[in-house]
Image: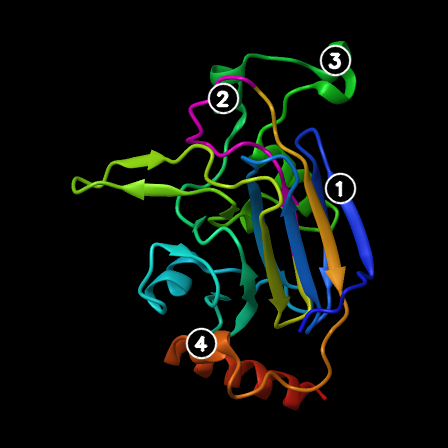
Amino acid sequence: MTATTPLYTKTLTHAGMWSGVISRGKTLRLTDLEGGANVGMLLYNADLTVERYNMPDTLKGQHTFHVRHPFCLHSDMGRLLASITADTVGWHDTVCGCSDAALAAGKYGTQTYQTHRNDFFRSARECFLIELAKWGLGERDLVPNLNLFSKVVADESGRLTFVSSHSRAGDQIDLRLELNTLVVLNTCQHPLDPDTTYRPRSVKLEVFPAVAGPVPAEDPCRRSRPENHRAMENNEAYFALRA
């Protein structure tokens, strides 16, 4: 059960971006403060950054196109980076990537820092690269990202459609970190969002203390798929060997 008092709180506004290492067992809670938020997320093993979130393994191991509670986020080394322990949204996009400078300029126009200061326009790719650079990472370390709070559906021909107003004000997602994890975030709008007005929504970030002891056998995320249980065992072996 998540503690009620966070260790750390921050609100992201104006295409806000953030990165930080959150240790194993702690919970990251993200809250959509206005409705219609999108949070682009990348995850890396903070102790071995060549290990990072793997979209194909996350999806095929859980037989899904999107993530929600009680699903897990897999790394490319057979381990878990995070488990979704609570979620009021029910659908988070995994396949659509992020906006780049050309997409942002074509959709919203150009608004520079020199003329508009903190209200200037940014793309999600730019935000990811700025945060990654703080940790000695760069373009070669970009992988397909998650888009939390956003829903995209596919029709019978495979055409993707963005579902507007999917997330409501107050919606939350809790992620329990299963490794010491470098979390990289930005709040730029989803690349398929048809809204041509540049208006990233505000998101609150909170980090809660770790729950003592190993993840129990009856944990819903651990039990949701056999692949999640095996990946959790790989995590446990990883830490046992490093202890």
Between the residue at mark 3 and the residue at mark 2, the CA separation in whole angstroms equals 19 Å
Disc 3 element: helix
Which stretch did the figure color magenta?
183-197
Residue type at mark 1 is: Thr
Q: Residue at x 34, y 54 (%)?
A: 65
Q: Quadrant of the C terminus?
A: bottom right
Mark in front: 4 vs 2: 4
Residue holding disc 2? 102
Q: In screen coordinates, is 222 left or right of 45? A: left
Q: In screen coordinates, is 209 left or right of 71? A: right
Q: Residue furthest left?
A: 156
Is 184 one of the magenta-colored residues?
yes
Residue holding disc 3? 116
| Residues packed near mark 2 inside 10 Å, few (<14), some (14 to 19) or many (20 plus) | few
Q: Residue at x 53, y 54 (%)?
A: 88
Residue holding disc 4? 228
Q: Residue at x 41, y 41 (%)?
A: 96
Residue holding disc 1? 11
| Residues packed near mark 4 inside 10 Å, few (<14), some (14 to 19) or many (20 plus) | many
